[in-house]
Structure formats: C-alpha cells, structure tokens
Amino acid sequence: MKLMIAPSILSADFGCLALELKKVEKAGADLIHVDVMDGHFVPNITIGPVVVKYMRKATKLDLDVHLMIENPAKYVDAFVKAGSDMITVHIETISPRGLADIARKLKNRGIKLGISLNPSTPIARVKNVLNIVDFVLVMSVNPGFGGQAFIPQAVNKIRQLRAIFKKDIAVDGGINNLTAEQVKEAGANILVAGSYIFGAKNVQDAINSLRRGDLK
Ligand code: DX5
Ligand code: ZN
C-alpha cells in the first residue's frame, strides 16, 4: 500500500496558488487536496469548480477534491468537468442510493470516489458503502478550518476501519510529524496536511517528516 502525502491548499497563499502548487509538487507531494466548503455543511466558504479548473492547469499532480457541501450530487458534474481526479463526499450529506449514482458516474470517467466521515460519525455509518468507494477519508478534526488540533479518537477509528477495509485510508486534520506516526501505525496511507506543510519554513522537510516511519 503506497503512502501518499496530500498537501491541503486551504493553508496555501491563494494570491499565488500556481506558485504554491509548484512548490509542493517540487517538494515531492503525491496529491493536491482541495477543500470545497459551502457555508452550509460547514461554517466556512472556500472555492468552487472555477478555481479547480485553473489549478488543473497549474499542476501535474492529481487533484483530490474534498466536498464539504450540503448537496454533493448537484455539483459532482461541475467538479468532474473542472478536472478532479478524486472526489470525496461526506456520508452525512448523501444516501446510499445517491452515492451509488455518483460511483457509477465517476467509474465511467476513471475518477476515484472517496467517502468521508466527521469525527462524531461512527465507522458503522459507512460500512454498507465500502464496496462502492475507492477510499475512505477519516476526519480527525471537525471540518471547516485548517490549523485545528488533531482529535485522538480518530486513531481508533482508523484501526477499526483498517480491519475491514483493504483499500486506501486517508486522514485529514491536525496531521503533523507526531500525529502522522500514530495514524500510519493504525493503518492510514494517505495523509492530508495543510498548515503543517504550508506553514513550514521548509516544505520539503515537512513532507519528508510525514513520510518517515513505518507504514503498516
Ligand atoms: C478541514 C479540511 C482539511 C484542512 C486540514 O476542514 O478538510 O483538509 O485543510 O488542515 P490542517 O492540516 O491544518 O489541519
Ligand atoms: Zn479536507
């Protein structure tokens, strides 16, 4: 299972997004994590498809689009068209049938589907959709903002999920060199990190420090 580091552009300087993308690309990032927020599902508003479209032109890396929005089904087509390579929706925002429709659509286009769950949502909630998703994104903070503290209960959730799920497990929120060790040990293999990477003096050192240590 490949360990992948996904810098979250939420903590980048949006005034020079293309440069920020190049910076993490050069420093060895595997994916670019794109946080889409609508001010309804979460108390913050960020970016929409138009920004994703121009990010697509500015980096060769896959764009991992995290939809923290109330009605993901309505907007999936727009994010597909904008050039997303991976799209994650929240289990709190969709029915199993709605998710199956999205899964079919993305599969036809070779785009990976992720399901995400908030810290207060138990693993049991995603069990019946694990067979139709490519990865699970475990939230280790309440979604909405970068720079929050890691919620330690996420470690057990990852461990619980790893016991029943053999595909990629991503973790998002409060990841730094210390929490990275814990989540890797529990079985996560995609590490999303915003403030730890973009706030670092040396972005390459920050990315390397997330890679160190053994992956289960
Ligand atoms: C939180 C977002 C995260 C966030 C992570 O709502 O989904 O992707 O950018 O930021 P850090 O790594 O700073 O916690
Ligand atoms: Zn995110």
Image (tube, rainbow, N blue to C red):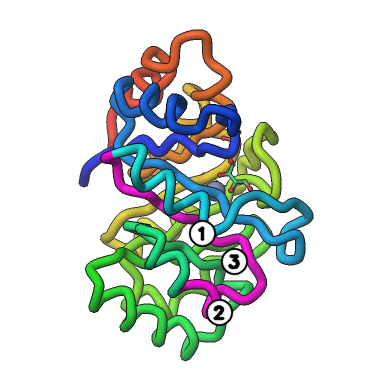
The earlier-in-sequence mark between 2 and 3 is 2
Identified at 67% across, 32% down, the residue is 147
For this view, does 40 lie left or right of residue 169? Answer: right
The earlier-in-sequence mark between 1 and 3 is 1
Cα separation, mark 2 vs mark 3, equals 25 Å
Cα separation, mark 1 vs mark 3, equals 30 Å
Which residues make up the magenta segment?
60-76
Q: Nearer the viewer, mark 1 or mark 3?
A: 1
Cα separation, mark 1 vs mark 2, equals 12 Å
The quarter in which the C terminus is drawn is top left
- 62, 82: nearer the viewer: 82
Q: Is residue 187 visible?
A: no
- Amino acid at the residue labelled 1: Pro
Is disc 1 placed on a helix, strand or loop?
helix
Identified at 66% across, 72% down, the residue is 70
Is the CB of mark 3 within 8 Å of ligand 1? no
Ligand 1 positioned in quadrant:
top right
Is disc 2 placed on a helix, strand or loop?
helix
The dot on residue 74 is 2
- Amino acid at the residue labelled 2: Lys
- Amino acid at the residue labelled 3: Pro
Q: Residues within 10 Å of mark 2 (few under 14, many from 20)?
A: few
Q: Which residue is mark 1?
A: 49
The earlier-in-sequence mark between 1 and 2 is 1
The furthest residue to the top: 201
The number of discs equals 3
Return the x and y of residue 64 as percentages of the image width and height. Answer: 40, 51
Answer whether labels 1 and 2 touch (C-beta < 8 Å).
no
Identified at 78% across, 55% down, the residue is 43
Q: Which residue is mark 3?
A: 122
Q: Nearer the viewer, mark 1 or mark 2?
A: 1
